[in-house]
Image (cartoon, rainbow, N blue to C red):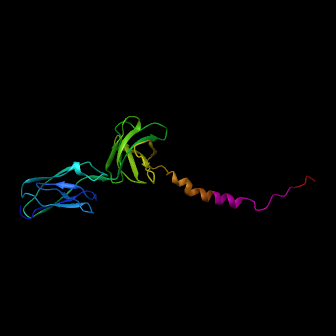
Amino acid sequence: MGGTRLLIDADGVAGVPVEGNGAAVYTNMFGKAVVADVNNYYRNQAYIDLNNLPENAEVTQSVVQATLTEGAIGYRKFSVISGQKAMAVLRLQDGSYPPFGAEVKNDNAQNVGLVDDDGNVYLAGVKPGEHMTVSWGGVAHCDIHLPDPLPADLFNGLLLPCQQTGAISPSVPNEIKPVIQEQTQQVTPTEPPVSVSAN
């Protein structure tokens, strides 16, 4: 056994149970844990106990491997997504849906959902105000923005418009509206118009 250790990174998610050759250890508040029961010069496995995950966590990769020399400290990272879960419908600007199998990724490039028939998608790692990108054919096509605050029921009728990637956010017109009003007010006459006699 020696002093060989394996440092585990769970993407900053706390309370994730990780097992090696012995009892499970749990990630700390920074999403880190140390697996101490590591064999020297042999391939070791560490895996996440999927049955005891924190409530708002999803794992896309649950097993890592490492072969370490005596006294070495290895490092392995699990892909863990933290946030609420939701069922949503994605709608493109022309009223159609993203194609079957389109991928939804968060800002960390983690795959958080796959589009099903008629734009239906199960999303993991949902957070208020979060931005996600929808891709198909290996190309990012549109973006969705989650509401803030999130609705109480995330499994009933959450419709998410998917705007073309790079398009102006819907919040922008609200930001420029006061400017337009101000310009309008500047050209508005401050005195009533004076009628001119035909004579």
Q: Is residue 79 left or right of residue 47?
A: right
Closest to the observer, 50 or 103: 50
Q: Is residue 187 part of the magenta span, yes or no?
A: yes
Q: Quadrant of residue 7?
A: bottom left
State the count of labels: 0
Q: Position of residue 81 (x, y in %)?
A: 30, 52
What residue is drawn where x is 48% and y is 37%?
Answer: 95
As drawn, the residue found furthest toward the right would be: 199
Image quarter in which the N terminus is found: bottom left
Q: Position of residue 34 (x, y in %)?
A: 17, 61
Q: Is residue 31 left or right of residue 144?
A: left
What residue is drawn where x is 36% and y is 39%?
Answer: 115
Q: Report the magenta residues as a range.
A: 181-195
Closest to the observer, 180 or 20: 20
What residue is drawn where x is 69% and y is 61%?
Answer: 186
Q: Quadrant of residue 6?
A: bottom left
Image quarter in which the C terminus is found: bottom right
Q: Position of residue 2 (x, y in %)?
A: 6, 63
What residue is drawn where x is 55% and y is 53%?
Answer: 173
Closest to the observer, 100 or 160: 160
As drawn, the residue found furthest toward the top would be: 117
Q: Is residue 93 left or right of residue 70?
A: right
Q: Is residue 101 part of the magenta span, yes or no?
A: no
